[in-house]
Amino acid sequence: MGKYIKAVFLLLLAAAPIALVLILIFGEDSQYNADYTVAEYNEQSEIEYGYADVTADEIVEPQYTTLTLGGLWFSRAVRSEVERFNSESERYRIELLSFSEYTYLDPITGVYVVDYEAVKEKDVDMIIDDLGVWFSPVDLYAFIDADPELNREDFFPNVLASMESSYGTLSFITYAFGIETMISMREVAEQISPFTFQNIFMQLNEPSTPGFVNFGLPWNFIVDRALLLCGDYFLDLENNLANFYNDEFLSVLKIAEHPIGRDFALEGMLTILSAEWGRFQRGDALLSQFWINNLERLRIYDAILGGIVATGIPTVAGGVHVINTQSAIGITADSPHQEVAWSFIRRFLLPTHGYGDDLNGLPLRIDLFEESITRLMTADIRDGVEYPRELEWPGSRTPLFPEPILLLYAMTEYEAAQIREIVETAVSARRFYDVEWHVHEIVREEAVVFIETARTAEETALVIQERVQALLDYW
């Protein structure tokens, strides 16, 4: 009997490893993975075991909390980061809500406006800054100050200030920014400086410079920028006084009266550059609007047009460069998911964030800005770009520049200092709130009458002065 017991014991001992292997194989795979969909699990079961018997009732779908980001438009960088966030987060999803359907053409001003009454009824967790005034955004400084990886000193202070509210809180923040300015020929800039409205108007009518047949921009640009950049000069809200009947505003109207002279197609950089080159060389334009959204754009224009400088946009005191922060994002005060919203926004602000081709602007972070400067200054000179003498069109060849131009890729110390000065001295344009919106509408309405009728600049300035003062007295 003992021999039989011993034999059975040895048989069980020998079978133990095989049983263990079978348990590991079939036991592990038989555990259902809740992340699988029904189709994925059934497909695997059918391939490995020859059957598929899992039903939808047996699967627990992942539960996500959805946050909404609202805006009139979304940059490629924002869309890319939303996709990346959604693919990485196990609990949250971000949904883009476009308000473009709430825009319409104003028949009086001829510009597109937003139906804010309809927009503000929407529930959103985050908002792009062009709609922020209607959603009571929270102060992002509180999040930055509590963040162990971020600091206010990481960013350009004037750019941060341009995104602040009138109370000094940071309502919105962006990962990159651009500079709106104007360019002119170097010798012209030296004659006009400082670039005030009066000096510009005097230059336009100077007998020794008859070639300047236009200012180079539409009238609404001149009027709008005057209000955005010189609003405190024309409007004293503290004392409820209008100040439109003066020499500076009369100069604004008379500059706006000049023909714009833009008759070329904007079909790529080379076409734009060739048209601008011709306009400046012929003396057809005094100034031209200019956007700096990368570190090389100004020196490309300077190399091709020759002797180009950034003068700034004219104001009552002189030319200024203006900060533009499109796609700045804020968090709404009503959002129940503010911490999650910040976890999304901060991704743009870290030095390790990979922008790639999605970055259409200058980096907000000072360290990334300086890294880009260093990279351009140490670049291989052989990486230069040669612009051809002629531009080929179907069936013809169009003269472009008088001779081939080789723009060396390596940035010089002078060019680096120039772009630093532009960025560090750039200012923010004022935002229109409450009564200022109505003032802006009055000025635009009367400017249209001035441009389209025989009414004089003096008569127009007087009408605007009386209408705005009546509004202030009523308000």
Image (spheres, rainbow, N blue to C red):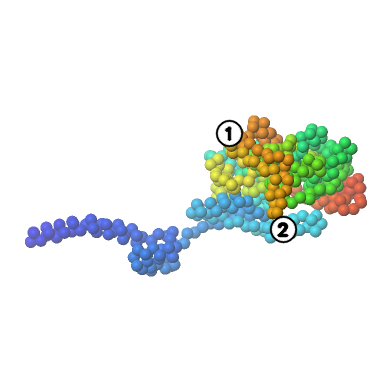
Check residue 81 in the rendering and tell me which mark sits there, or answer none.
none
Q: Residues within 10 Å of mark 2 (few under 14, many from 20)?
A: some
Residue 217 drawn at (x, y percent): 79, 46
Question: Would you say residue 82 is visible in this rendering?
Answer: yes
Location of the N terminus by quadrant is bottom left
Q: Which residue is drawn at 38% across and 61% down?
A: 32
Q: Residue at x 67, y 49 (%)?
A: 129
Q: Residue at x 15, y 57 (%)?
A: 10
User: What distance separates the C-alpha of mark 1 from that of mark 2?
Assistant: 47 Å
Which residue, given by chain and number where applicable, does mark 1 sit on? 378
Residue 164 drawn at (x, y percent): 67, 42
Left or right of 233: which side holds 3?
left
Tags 1 and 2 touching, CB below 8 Å = no
- Mark 1 belongs to which amino acid? Thr
Residue 389 drawn at (x, y percent): 69, 43
Residue 188, quarter of picture: top right
Which residue, given by chain and number where applicable, does mark 2 sit on? 103
Residue 121, above or below 392: below
Residue 244, quarter of picture: top right
Q: Residues within 10 Å of mark 1 (few under 14, many from 20)?
A: few
Question: Would you say residue 241 is visible in this rendering?
Answer: no
- Mark 2 belongs to which amino acid? Thr
Left or right of 207: which side holds 435?
left
Q: Earlier in the sequence, mark 1 or mark 2?
A: 2
Q: State which mark lies toward you, 1 or 2.
A: 1
Residue 112, above or below 236: below
Q: Is mark 1 on a helix, strand or loop?
A: loop
Which one is nearer the viewer's eye here, 400 or 250?
Answer: 400
Residue 97, above or below 183: below
Left or right of 240: which side holds 409?
left
